[in-house]
Amino acid sequence: MTGGVTSSLGKGIISSSLAKLLQSRGYRVTIQKLDPYINVDPGTLNPYEHGECYVTEDGAETDLDLGHYERFLNTSTSQENNVTTGRIYQSVIEKERRGDYLGKTVQVIPHITDEIKNRIRLVGKKYNYDIVITEIGGTVGDIESLPYIESVRQLKWDLGASNCLVIHLTLVPYLPTSGELKTKPTQHSVKLLQEAGIQPDVLVLRTQKTLTADIRKKVALFCNVELSSVIESVDAETIYDVPLLMLGEKLDETVLKKLELPLKQKPELKPWKDFLKRLKSPRYVVHIGLVGKYVELHDAYKSISESFTHAGAANECKVELEYIHSEYVTDENVAEKLEHLDGILVAPGFGSRGIEGKIIAARYAREHNIPYLGICLGMQCSVIEFARNVLGFKNANSTEMNRKTPYPVIDLMEEQKGVTAKGGTMRLGAYPCLINKESRVYKAYGTELVNERHRHRYEFNNTFLEDFKKAGMRAAGINPDTNLVEIMEIPSHRWYVGTQFHPEYRSTVLQPHPLFVSFVEAALRYAREKEGGQETAGTVKNSNKMEKASQNG
């Protein structure tokens, strides 16, 4: 899967949609992302640079597109699903130092391209997939992408036309002044691919307006592809519409025919359609504030926002997310910023910037009995706030923010104290968590043992655990191997939970994360109570005012 004309056309969504359709036909499918930047992984990148860093089960820090892959396919990815130029060159240089190429001059061709091809093949062989969709980051014509494009050319020659095909995603812009859709950018983009030795097999055309038959014929003729291989991808109401749109365009049929694979059964997408129905026809509206430090770029919290989409649909509810910059939350304005909300989420992050605003938000939620979810640093902020304002531990803090704090309620993990390198050295990936059966989160999960993904260096300091318990905040989840506190909650509060792990990484369309579902449910009950109704167990069912608000958008 290559892209042309401009970036951000949605290669990841088209890849995920195609994979979903192929999966629903009975094939074992995975998606891989090749990123052309020289960082070994995005773990050291500022979220403003690249959006969120997504973490896999096996602890790989990866591109946010892998989150889309998992949310669509409902299957886990691994470190083999994300490859960067940095990782490719690192591997080749390590081989050269070992003497693997002894006597040879190491060059882009064949050594770099061979390594890229090996990585593409590896993910399929290792996990026995039938089909691997490889998304190449960037845009055709970028100098950074050239080795990947050349690798694709070679791979197509190596495997043969029936085992490898190229889908090219381009833009057909609409010019309102002339009232026309223009195909020239697509023609130039395909020409760049052809100059690199690649003839695309399928063209997916992103467009604001429906393509006419004449435009499709023109693109097919000028770009040397079959008419049936010109696929329209018109702007959709939601990304979750795209699999159905691609089904209507017969993208999966076209791909399977070109790969000479049987169509097998028809795609079974009833659960997906049921989700879309709930998503598009919510009965209620709930307003939740996301307090973070990277809120100018919503992609920095992509998995969180998508988790609310899944949880909202599960509750027949539209979640209106309000992004609130923690750096600008103060004691003086906190009520103005938060009092109208039905729930408050304090987001993860690193560093001291904006930390006091997060702590103030956690205090406001606790004192005003507003449903609260703190994730990673958000959990740590709730702990710091509780220590300062309930336990009376003046100047309590995390040693990440203040190494000399007299009350280090959050401290550097023991195994992290000798670590100096930054890349890939945090506590990463899935770890077990034993849930307290008397806790609120146990009711959400419905099971005692769960596995959740982590990305952190600092942890709750167990020296203070008994102090917190006596004052009303308890550990609701513990790692059974290390005794690390995974979940903190306040039982007397309406819904106040902090997790050291990242639940958003495990939420999918067909399996919304239980903590997000429970949090949204609590926010709905709180909203109903504010409207003057009586709080009842389970999801709110009879709020006419809220239902009317939903209908009015």
Image: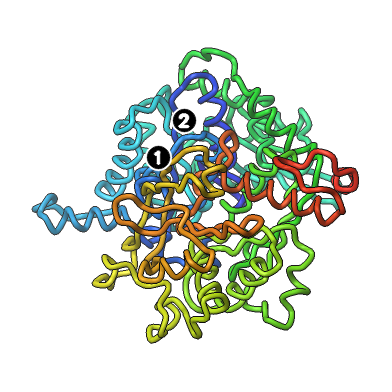
State the image coordinates of residue 225 (x, y, percent, origin top left).
58, 29
Q: Residues within 10 Å of mark 1 (few under 14, many from 20)?
A: many
How far apart marks 1 and 2 lie (CA) works out to 9 Å
Residue 41's tag is none
On screen, 156 above or below 432?
above
Q: Please tell me which residue lies in front, 345 or 216.
A: 345
Res. 366 visible in picture:
yes
- Residue at image coords 73%, 68%: 338
Residue that appears at 66% across and 41% down? 239
Q: How many marks?
A: 2
Q: Amino acid at mark 2?
A: Leu
Nearest the eye: 385 or 193: 385
Which residue lies under the disc numbered 2?
165
Q: Nearer the viewer, residue 62 or 458?
A: 458
Q: Which one is earlier in the sequence, the residue at label 1 or at label 2?
A: 1
Where disc 1 sits, the SS reads helix
Q: In this rendering, is residue 137 above or below 382?
A: above
Q: Residue lying at the far front in this picture: please name it.
A: 470
User: Percent from the top left, x then y, of residue 45?
Assistant: 45, 66
Is residue 427 rendered to the left or right of residue 29? left
Image quarter of residue 227: top right
Report which residue position mark 1 lands on: 152
**Residues marked 1 and 2 touching at CB (< 8 Å):** no
Residue 221 horizontal/vertical position (percent): 64, 30
- Left of 457 or right of it: where is 318? right
Residue 234 percent across, percent down from the top left: 72, 38
In this rendering, would 483 be left or right of 216? left
User: What residue sits 63% from the left and 32% below the top?
Assistant: 243
Residue 177 seen from this side: no
User: Nearest the camera: 447 or 170?
Assistant: 447
Q: Amino acid at mark 1?
A: Val
Does dot 2 land on a helix, a strand or a loop? Answer: loop
